[in-house]
Image (cartoon, helix red, strand yellow):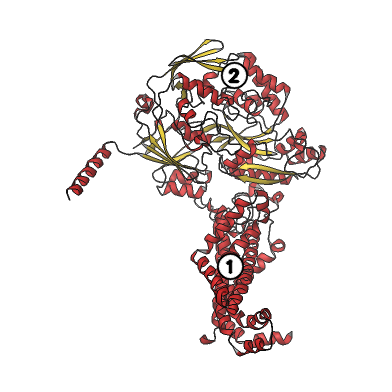
Amino acid sequence: MAAAVKRFFDSDLWWSFTRSPVTVLSAIVALVCILGALFAPWIAPHNPFDLASLNLIDAFKPPAWEEEGVAEYVLGTDDQGRDVLSAIMYGARVSLIVGISATLFATFVGVSLGLLAGYAGGHVDSVLMRICDVQLTFPSILVALLVDGITRAALPREVHDQIALFVVIFAIGISEWPKFARTVRGSTLVERNKEYVQAARVIGVPSARIMVSHVLPNVVGPVLVVATLNLGLAILSEATLSFLGVGVPPTQPSLGTLIRIGNDFLFSGEWWITIFPGIALIAMVLSVNLLGDWLRDALNPKLR
Amino acid sequence: MRKLLMAAALAAGLGAGWVGAEARTVRWAASGDPNTMDPHSQNVGTVTMVLQQIYDPLISRDQNLGLAPGLATRWEQVEPNRWRFWLRDGVKFHEGQAFTADDVVFTVVRAQQQTSNYAIYVDTIDRAVQVEPLVVDIITRVPDPILPNKIASILIMSRAWAEQHNATRPQNTRAREEMFTTRNTNGTGAFRLQSREPDVRTVMARNNDWWGWSQPASREANVTEIVYRPISSDATRIAALLSGEVDFVLDPPLQDLNRLRQAQGIRVVEGPEVRTIFIAMDVFRDELLYSDVRGRNPLKDLRVRQALYHAIDINAIHRTTMRGQSVVTGTFFPPQVNGYTQSEDVRLPYDQARARALLAEAGYPNGFEITLDCPNNRYINDEQICQAIVAMWARVGVRARLNSMPLAPFFAKIQRDDTSIYLLGWGVPTLDALYSFQSLLRSRDGGQGNGIWNYGRYSNPRMDALIDIMVNQSGEARNAAIREALRIYREDVPHIPLHHQMIPWAMRANLQIPHMANNQPYFRWARVN
């Protein structure tokens, strides 16, 4: 273990990381976001879901540094007296859960199909890639809206509310998989003709095993980059869906939901209800994207 | 080439003609869309605000909500049980049918059908009979002194048209039925329906043949087209008004009023509405539908209802959620309504300790679970009021789940009695207390209009008896019945009253339209400068 840690700090990756202040900064921001979201129930100043703790008297308090602000609510309160900072922390939790799960789902589907297409070739490849092509012609948010709309129409309201989170994860995941499949297929096409694969085939290793234990480890680098960049996109997609009111159920407000609710008060001077969740969303997505950019460059031998 | 020149000349000629009769379009927005175009299917303000532009009643309202001649030029109680109406000559429906007494007879029968939501207005009517082609008698089962007030809410349809399109009974909205009248209209009114896309756009065009354009109130009116668009998002609706995309917003969000008052070229007109917002409860079922209490219905226990009442900090809602734009009340119709009694307009005070004690006394020391049904685009800040109330109940231990939805599914749900507790707003078009009592509190015994909006199924024999007195008697006996019924309402807590609505309207400064306490814009009186 110690050796592994030492190897990591000796690696090119760490070296290029420490040489890029922007990357270090975004890593810190991303870490703050993730930790804040992860530990929200313990470190958030209030619990916005505990209705008994809400008081209408505290509604529309501006941020602490404004004239009528109070220290108890650092970023102010919304129309029901919920603490905006706590709501953001809990909301970021939902956004991150959806973003990460959707990306993992897309990665799983995309990598499996990409490997299959690249390794099997022929008709399998043609069919899978044409499906990819068709899906890539639709904007991914449209695919997500379509999936969400169909499940909404097909399921009764009570059932839908209960599984809404999974529907959103599925909707976003299914709209993003072609990117992964494309990337993996390309790398697999290169790898499958290399000698180690041919050798494995000659000694009779089953195709599935070759794909998973020989080809996969060698195509995982680009997948990591796509996944990181995609995480930011998935979080944004979720926020968009929730902003349109079709994402996560209102009982589990994500950042997008918070922005939508706050949007109604934008004209009336209660700007903090929507601006702060917006800033949190930007910080989260931007930092993840910058990390993804750095990872792409760091893993690209041509740029070293 | 000659053809082209001719076409150009023609176009120029047409253009000149249009300048003469200048098109004045009013683009109008509100949060919700009417859930039907059938005139007798949904007694809901969102529906009538559109349909009253298209259809006429026998008796109209003037700008102070007084009675004024409509399709009837005069009316008279010729016998205690018989009202006679003399109809306007030469009136035509939009599709060309001549208006006659037979259409009135047909409409009254239609409004009395099982699927009608307007039975409350025709409850005392035995039948309507044609005396002459333009004279019709309405015969009531009991003497009904307020019949003209009720008949003013019944929009007149054409018998020939309804029969032709299989629409002789109102659409059953409750069962989500769709029929010809869901999307089509044929009235005698000042505007005709030009196109309708539900939830998107409803366009009405001026009916130049309307009988009323020569009347004093409409002489200056010049609107030629109304484009109604539902915009549910508060911010979007106001952005549309500020950017000039719409001219008139019926329900501007309260938080934006200050900004609107200061905006250039925007006018805000304010006034009270004859509408009360309250929470009604299922006091009928032996087990609530959406609750964790098994085998009994906590809302049947007066103490629980009182506890839920005591838990509501109405002043906080008035100040914060309504931003001062409401009149807090302890009863269920406002002072403009005949029968209003100041001494009965008393709330149970906000008292959390008392609420907790009452709950414990009733056997729910740890509270219980319940689901509050709430519309989110019908009344002013309806969803926010519900959110605030859910939080207030949580503080005394009642765990309410908020189920908020747009008005169409909301009304369909409560009209199927598929609810435990719900928020409702009740306007009083007749300006008489009976309308509220009979619709909301009378036992549902199959009588026309009885308990037609009583989805909590409150039933009290004494209340029923008092309501029957209000129907059958007049003078001091009737007033005494109203007073006693109001006291029973206060003691029985079938509802938790909240407030009367204030209704600001926001519009471009060049639009003039009288502000109405029934929250209905009448574009026949509107002028665009």
Q: Chain of mark 2?
A: B
The residue under the point 68% across, 19% down is: B466
The residue at which mark 1 appears reads as A284
* Residue furthest to the left: B2
Q: Position of residue B265 (x, y in %)?
A: 39, 44
The residue under the point 45% across, 45% down is: B260
Q: Which mark is residue B124?
A: 2
Secondary structure, mark 1, is helix
Q: From the image, state whether disc 2 or disc 1 is nearer to you.
A: 2
Q: Amino acid at mark 2?
A: Thr
Label 2 crowd bin: few (<14), some (14–19), many (20+), radius 10 Å = many
Q: Position of residue A191 (x, y in %)?
A: 59, 84
Q: Chain of mark 1?
A: A
Secondary structure, mark 2, is loop
Q: Position of residue B359 (x, y in %)?
A: 78, 39
Q: Is residue B168 visible?
A: yes
Pick the front one: A257 or B252: A257
The residue under the point 20% across, 49% down is: B4
Q: Amino acid at mark 1?
A: Met
Is B180 placed left or right of A147 in the picture? left
Pick the front one: B179 or B362: B179
Pick the front one: A239 or A177: A177
Q: Is residue B387 visible?
A: no
Q: How many marks?
A: 2
